[in-house]
Image: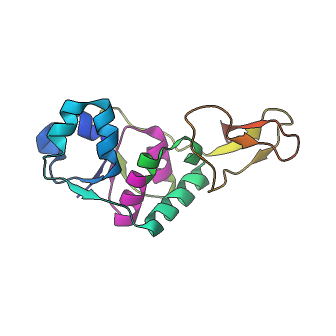
Amino acid sequence: MRVLDTAALLYWPVTEITGGICSVSQLSELQKVSEQRHMLVSNLDINWQEPVAEWLENARTAAANSGDLPRLSSVDLDILALAMGLDLPLFTDDYRLQNTMQMAGLATHPVGTKGAKQVWQWELRCTGCGSTEAVPPDVESRKTGPVKDCASCGAPMVLKRKR
């Protein structure tokens, strides 16, 4: 048994996807990317699940600990929660998901890439005064840009690799 990220649903042959575990939230993501693939995948024998609230909280905490939380979507968190909660390997090409899983000591496998070679830890760094802080577990997800404002000087804080 294994948890599959949306990349696997998009690119793997049907025989590889069948029997996998996926989040219900991936269906809408898949539909946005490829209507045809969505129609195909939604009719396969896939174990569609909603993550338990406790699993989601654990996933948010693990992603905050690695520093990846601000750049993970709600679908990413659902997938992460399933893999962590069920203690199953996660098949994904998303380096942030791989990083979080590896920091938590859990297995990941790439879908179509070579996979992450290193585990990185991220922190918030102020663009004004240079102060740093850990990524809080209640931070909002954003694709790009500042994560929050600095408590010391008010300048934007951005996600940077921990030194």
The structure's colour scheme is rainbow
Residue 9 occupies quadrant: top left
| Residue at position x 87%, y 36% in the image | 129
Question: Where in the figure is residue 116, as x and y percent of width and height?
Answer: 44, 38
In the image, residue 88 lies in the stretch drawn in magenta: yes
96 sits left or right of 3 in the view:
right
Picture residue at 48% right of the left edge, 44% below the top: 73
Could you tell whether 31 is left or right of 74 in the image? left
The x and y percentages for residue 159 are 66, 38
* Quarter-of-image position of residue 109: top left
Q: Is residue 111 visible?
A: no
The answer, for residue 20, to whether it is visible in the render is yes
Residue extent of the magenta highlight: 78-102
Q: Position of residue 115 (x, y in %)?
A: 39, 37
Question: Residue at 25% across / 35% down in the picture?
Answer: 10
Nearest the eye: 31 or 59: 31
Q: Is the residue 110 above or below the residue 134 in the image?
A: above
Q: Main secondary structure of the magenta part?
A: helix
* Residue depicted at x 40% and y 67%: 52
* Residue 45 covered by magenta stretch: no
Quarter of the picture holding the C terminus: top right
Quadrant holding the N terminus: bottom left
